[in-house]
Image (spheres, helix red, strand yellow):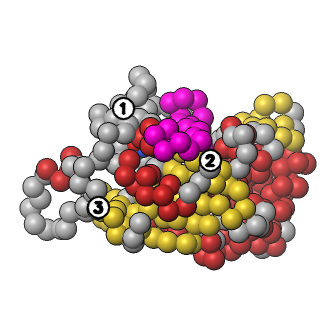
Amino acid sequence: MKSVVSYPDRGKWGKNSWRGNTSGYIIKDLIEHFKPSLFVDVCEGSGTSGDVCREMGVEYIGLDLYKGQDFTKDYILSFLPRPADICFSHPPYHSMIRYSGSVWGKCPVEGDTSHCKSVDEFLEKSQVMLLNQREATKDGGIYTTLIGDMRKNGSYRSFQADFIGMMPKNELLNVVIKVQHNMMSNKTHYSGKFIPIVHEYLLIWRKSAKSLFAIAWDTAKEIKRQVASTWRSAIRIALMKLGGQASLQEIYREVENIAQHLISKNRNWRAKIRQQLQYHFRNVQRGVWAM
Ligand SMILES: C[S@@+](CC[C@H](N)C(=O)[O-])C[C@H]1O[C@@H](n2cnc3c(N)ncnc32)[C@H](O)[C@@H]1O
């Protein structure tokens, strides 16, 4: 594998009828390069990576929202027999292709990041996905995502730059540019005002042996205001770690670990957490909150 890859033929794996599917050759290259014994795909779509893993004799676990696993809510590690050698994602590129209600299912499903109402919401949930992937990866293992940039209504948004900014700088191992072929948008003729996007990125991180909470704190420091709702991310990650539901006291304790820099700037941080819980989470019983 080199830092630019191009596979004109997508190969026999997965289904090209699943919109936004990827070529199996990139999975094959990842496996040949890193030689994992357990490969996990957290948004497997048509099952491209599973087909490649079976052919190459690599143990595989595939998750997806349409199968009932939501990377914004469910703790990925809880679906695995052990932490992954490679934890891969190929998420929606915001609203470029809508999944639930279009590619599968009859209507939009909560958690589907192709239905986020804003870029900030998409980035916040994508950060939870990346931290969740990281948590599901063994120390020294690889967590990686395939993501494209987006141009909508004339403005350009570099999700790859956002994603890199959200995660610990010292864990970034490689950025691979993947040329895109046979996209529907390739067949569109533009008026010549802007340059069509015909590439996407494989971002590869290697997990150092640091706890999620230490990383989340570093990350929160790094991203500052890049993700508008960092408090919300901190609470979401805390709740995920606590099994999706927890008492206020447990949430305070976990958020205290995750978001020290936010807490140090806000003397009323407990009130802030209660306010965020009321806005964005469910009160399931007195003093108990859920995702
Ligand atoms: C780009 S497609 C993956 C395509 C796949 N790599 C293939 O080759 O067929 C993105 C997938 O992310 C899934 N997805 C969206 N939101 C999700 C969530 N919150 N948790 C898990 N999967 C999600 C969608 O259902 C969709 O199958």
How far is disc 2 from disc 1 in space, using C-alphas?
28 Å
Residue 114 vertical position relative to residue 214 in the rendered view, above or below: above
Does 213 sit left or right of 202 as displayed? right
Is any part of residue 155 visible from this angle? yes
Label 1 Cα neighbours within 10 Å, binned few <14 / some 14-19 / many ≥20: some
Secondary structure found at label 3: strand
Q: Which residue is mark 3?
A: 6
Mark 1 CB lies closer than 8 A to ligand 1: yes
Give the magenta-colored segment's residue range: 53-71
Residue 253 spot, x, y in % from top left: 88, 55
Does 12 sit left or right of 219 as displayed? left
Does 82 sit left or right of 286 as displayed? left
Inspect the image, locate mark 2, and give the three-letter code of the amino acid beneath it.
Leu
Q: Which residue is mark 1?
A: 103
Q: Which residue is mark 2?
A: 38
Inspect the image, locate mark 1, and give the three-letter code of the amino acid beneath it.
Val
Secondary structure found at label 1: loop
First in sequence: mark 3 vs mark 2: 3
Residue 270 spot, x, y in % from top left: 84, 57
User: Does residue 69 show up magenta in the picture?
Assistant: yes
Label 2 Cα neighbours within 10 Å, binned few <14 / some 14-19 / many ≥20: many
Q: Nearer the viewer, mark 1 or mark 3?
A: 3
